Structure formats: structure tokens, C-alpha cells
Amino acid sequence: MLLARVAGTVVSSRKETRLEGLKFLLLEQLGIDNKPTGGYVVAADAVGAGVDEVVMYASGSSARQTEYTDQRPVDAVVMAIVDSWEVGGNDVWQK
């Protein structure tokens, strides 16, 4: 799993039928220091995350292993909303 901040939403009125009903988020990837790494990814949202929230997401074949994304052609899925994290005993993020 990787860390990211929700930068926005992605709307698509025409899509593959197995993607119908999915909500998509634009994620800005974060490093362990809570700083952007410069990468972005579009992910299906399995947990109801909102803009500016920090989330954990999975990509690749792991993205299709949630109830929300099972048998759907997705490459990334938001699996958790982060409440806090620490590194070496120091708080890095607190919701």
C-alpha cells in the first residue's frame, strides 16, 4: 500500500460497463515525510474519502481484491483513510 492525498475527483460519463457506479479520485502520491513525490494516480474509492484527506491505496492486481473492485478493470483503489502516522517515534501526520 502507498500513501497519497486526495487532490480531486475524476468524472467520466462514458466508461466500460464494469466501471459503472465507481467513484474515482485523483491522488497526489506522498513520501514517508508527508511531502508530495510528484506523482499522481487515479483510483477507485472504496471507502468514501474526500478532497484533502490522506489515504492508503493499493495498485496493480491488489487493487482488484476488495469487495468494491472485485472483477473490475481497475489498477488502483483507495482502501483506507489515514488518521495518523509516525516515523521513528515522531508524528508525521495527524488528522
Image (cartoon, rainbow, N blue to C red):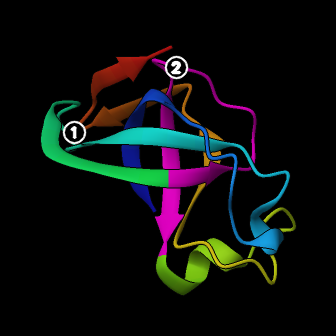
Q: Is residue 18 left or right of residue 26?
A: right
Query: In this rendering, is residue 74 above or below 48?
Result: below
Which circle marks residue 88 in the picture? 1
| Mark 1 element type | loop
Q: Position of residue 61 (x, y in %)?
A: 56, 86
* Nearest to the observer: residue 75 or residue 33: 75
Q: Is residue 21 left or right of residue 6?
A: right
Q: Quadrant of residue 69?
A: bottom right
* Nearest to the observer: residue 13 or residue 91: 13
**Residue at x-position 54% and y-position 40%:** 25
* Nearest to the observer: residue 49 or residue 82: 49
Q: Is residue 27 left or right of residue 88?
A: right
Q: Nearer the viewer, mark 2 or mark 1?
A: 2
Q: Position of residue 76 (x, y in %)?
A: 52, 64
**Residue at x-position 77% and y-position 52%:** 22
Q: Quadrant of residue 37?
A: top left
On the image, numbered disc 2 is attached to which residue? Answer: 51
Q: Is residue 93 left or right of residue 82?
A: left
Q: Earlier in the sequence, mark 2 or mark 1?
A: 2
Query: In this rendering, is residue 60 above or below 22?
Result: below
Label 1 crowd (10 A; few <14 / some 14-19 / many >=20): few
Label 2 crowd (10 A; few <14 / some 14-19 / many >=20): few
What is the span of residues highlighted in magenta in the rendered image?
Answer: 43-59
Q: Position of residue 49 (x, y in %)?
A: 65, 30
* Amino acid found under the numbered disc labelled 2: Val
